[in-house]
């Protein structure tokens, strides 16, 4: 019984000592502690204020500017989509003015517009900045990058990006058109074996695609020529 009381007393003394040290630490550092807490609150309020009063209004403004440019893009008016029409901004100025506040897709739109205008270097610059998460759009971006490099005569980078375009989701039927493009280009470069690999992938992996309907003739042409 005496031992239990002694242990209880020792535990109480340790608790009292711990509380005392905590109070001592607080008393010695209370200015620093409160300064840190106030700093955290101020930073938090600044972030909230920036988002509510600066970022969100800018994002809404950017979205409103995107509508006319997107409409021009859909209508195939790529120069207007990229440069604007004098009353509305184009993707180039939207990026300069708002950056990612306009949404990640603005870089894809700008890149595709520049590609259609054969402004390959500028298109590459925009497409490389596109960081979307949608597999179809990512595939489209890398396909476009490949087309840009093809336009510049850089076939190595063209094939590298086309190949990446087919890897985001191998179930997408859209991949068949990319593989067909790769196969035809390989044939034009005098590389029938690599072309045949692309055609057979279409036949094996994408039999339901439009490209698969007459892919047999591409395969037969190469195999017959051997």
Image: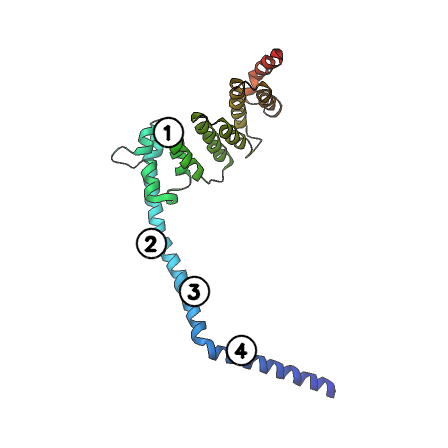
Q: Nearer the viewer, residue 175 or 159?
A: 159
Q: Give the alpha-carbon distance from disc 3 to disc 2, as whole Å.
A: 20 Å
- For mark 2, give the secondary structure: helix
Q: Marks 3 and 2: CB-CB under 8 Å?
A: no
Residue that appears at 36% across and 30% down: 73
- For mark 3, give the secondary structure: helix
- Disc nearer the start of the sequence (3/4): 4
- Disc nearer the start of the sequence (1/4): 4
Q: What residue does disc 1 label?
A: 119
Q: Is residue 105 left or right of residue 18?
A: left
Q: Is residue 121 left or right of residue 216?
A: left
Q: Give the alpha-carbon distance from disc 3 to disc 1, as whole Å.
A: 48 Å
- For mark 1, give the secondary structure: loop
Q: At which x and y percent is residue 178?
A: 52, 26
Q: Which label lies toward us, 3 or 2?
A: 3
Q: Marks 2 and 1: CB-CB under 8 Å?
A: no
Q: What residue does disc 2 label?
A: 53
Based on the displayed image, in which of its 4 quarters is residue 2 positioned?
bottom right
Q: Give the alpha-carbon distance from disc 2 to disc 1, as whole Å.
A: 37 Å
Q: Residues within 10 Å of mark 1 (few under 14, many from 20)?
A: some
Q: What residue does disc 3 label?
A: 40
Q: Residues within 10 Å of mark 4 (few under 14, many from 20)?
A: few
- For mark 4, give the secondary structure: helix
Q: Which label lies toward us, 1 or 4?
A: 1
In the rendered image, the quadrant that contains the N terminus is: bottom right
Q: At which x and y percent is residue 149?
A: 45, 29
Q: Nearer the viewer, residue 20 or 3?
A: 20
Q: At which x and y percent is residue 183?
A: 54, 21
Q: What residue does disc 4 label?
A: 22
């Amino acid at each position: 019984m005496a031992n239990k009381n002694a242990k209880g007393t020792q535990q109480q003394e340790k608790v009292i000592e711990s509380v005392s040290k905590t109070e001592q630490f607080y008393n010695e550092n209370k200015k620093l502690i409160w300064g840190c807490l106030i700093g955290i609150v101020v930073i938090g309020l600044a972030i909230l204020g920036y988002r509510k009063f600066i970022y969100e209004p800018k994002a809404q403004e950017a979205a409103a500017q995107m509508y006319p440019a997107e409409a021009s893009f859909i209508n195939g008016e790529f120069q207007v989509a990229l440069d604007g029409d004098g009353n509305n901004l184009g993707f180039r100025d939207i990026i300069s003015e708002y950056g990612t506040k306009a949404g990640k897709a603005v870089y894809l739109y700008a890149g595709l517009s520049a590609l259609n205008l054969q402004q390959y270097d500028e298109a590459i610059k925009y497409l490389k900045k596109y960081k979307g998460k949608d597999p179809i759009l990512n595939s489209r971006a890398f396909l476009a990058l490949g087309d840009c490099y093809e336009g510049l005569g850089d076939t190595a980078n063209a094939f590298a990006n086309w190949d990446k375009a087919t890897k985001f989701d191998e179930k997408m039927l859209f991949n068949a058109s990319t593989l067909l493009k790769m196969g035809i280009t390989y044939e034009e470069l005098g590389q029938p074996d690599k072309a045949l690999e692309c055609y057979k992938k279409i036949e094996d992996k994408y039999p339901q695609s439009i490209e698969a309907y007459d892919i047999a003739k591409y395969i037969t042409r190469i195999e017959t020529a051997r």
